[in-house]
Amino acid sequence: MNVSQSSRPMIGALSDVLAALDAHVTRLTRLEAAGDWALAFPALDRLKFVAVLRGTCWLMLPDRDPQPMSKGDVCLIGRTGYAVASNPTLPPVDGARLFDELGSDVLRLGGNDTVMLGGGVTFAPGNPVFLLDMLPAFLLVPGRSDGAGAVANILALLNDEAERADLGNELVSARLADVLLIEAIRVHAGNADATGVGWLGALTDRRIGRALQSIHADIAQPWTTARLAGIAGMSRAAFCAEFARRVGKAPLSYVRAWRLTLARAALARGGSDVARVAAEVGYTSQSAFGHAFRRAFGTSPKSSTRP
């Protein structure tokens, strides 16, 4: 897939975040339906993707107009409840309960005029907040949008895997779903509508994106507002205002949040002591690191360390 020059900083930072947070699809579900149907799913502290493999449907989220979806469309949903339906006026039933009662990852409702895939994206324990706070509650990648060819190819492979019973089928599907997540965000960021307010928009911005890319390239650097403003080619005041407007945090608040998120993930993986992790994320004082960690997470770094 061709990646626009403006989206290159996004890819580095996004890969950095997804890898550090150990983001992966833990459950892949399939819905086949025909006639009248409507399913609701609860808000969860994780990402969810919904992809349409065949037919059409409607997706409903709080405080938004119903969103039509058709073959090839993919959307990412943040920590909010949602519903999918053949008609947006139908009252939905509890979709999560239906899947649980069935005891299967495939739900069939009257036929297969519409076929959809859903996937829950989970993170390292305790670490979904950073990414969920940065991504929009709803992100749509239309199947006909520029650069969506890779997404269409992955959806076709996922559909093929779902219809086979070969050895390793579930593992292959899970890995394809992981790639689908990244490709969908790439396509969204590469399109013009991703350049507004928000983390993805900031990453694709020529100036703020340079500062964010520098932060993610070397978090242990002694970053200051003045230094980041210089990388962005802006005055301190203009940089701080624009960074906060786009990202939702002041520059050094973002640096601190990412440092502590990286530290928490490293401690949870085990194999590193507190002093080493503190230094790796840019703290020269273990005491200062401990204070910042407790203030952010309500617990000490040592208690978060896996043996």
Image (cartoon, rainbow, N blue to C red):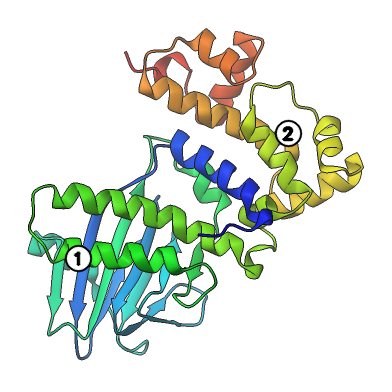
Label 2 neighbour load within 10 Å: few <14, some 14-19, many 20+: some
Give me the disc on residue 20.
Answer: none
Camera-side residue: 145 or 238? 145
Which residue is rendered at x = 28% and y = 68% of the image? 156
Q: Is residue 161 visible?
A: yes
Which residue is rendered at x = 22% and y = 90% of the image? 36
Image position, residue 167 (x, y; %): 8, 49
Give me the disc on residue 252.
Answer: 2
Camera-side residue: 229 or 304? 229
Camera-side residue: 200 or 244? 200
Image position, residue 161 (x, y; %): 18, 61
Snapshot quadrant of residue 96: bottom left
Give amino acid for label 2: Leu
Q: Quadrant of the C terminus?
A: top left
Q: Is residue 44 visible?
A: no
Q: Is residue 9 left or right of residue 74?
A: right
Q: CA distance from mark 2 to mark 1?
A: 46 Å
Q: Are marks 2 and 1 in contact (CB under 8 Å)?
A: no
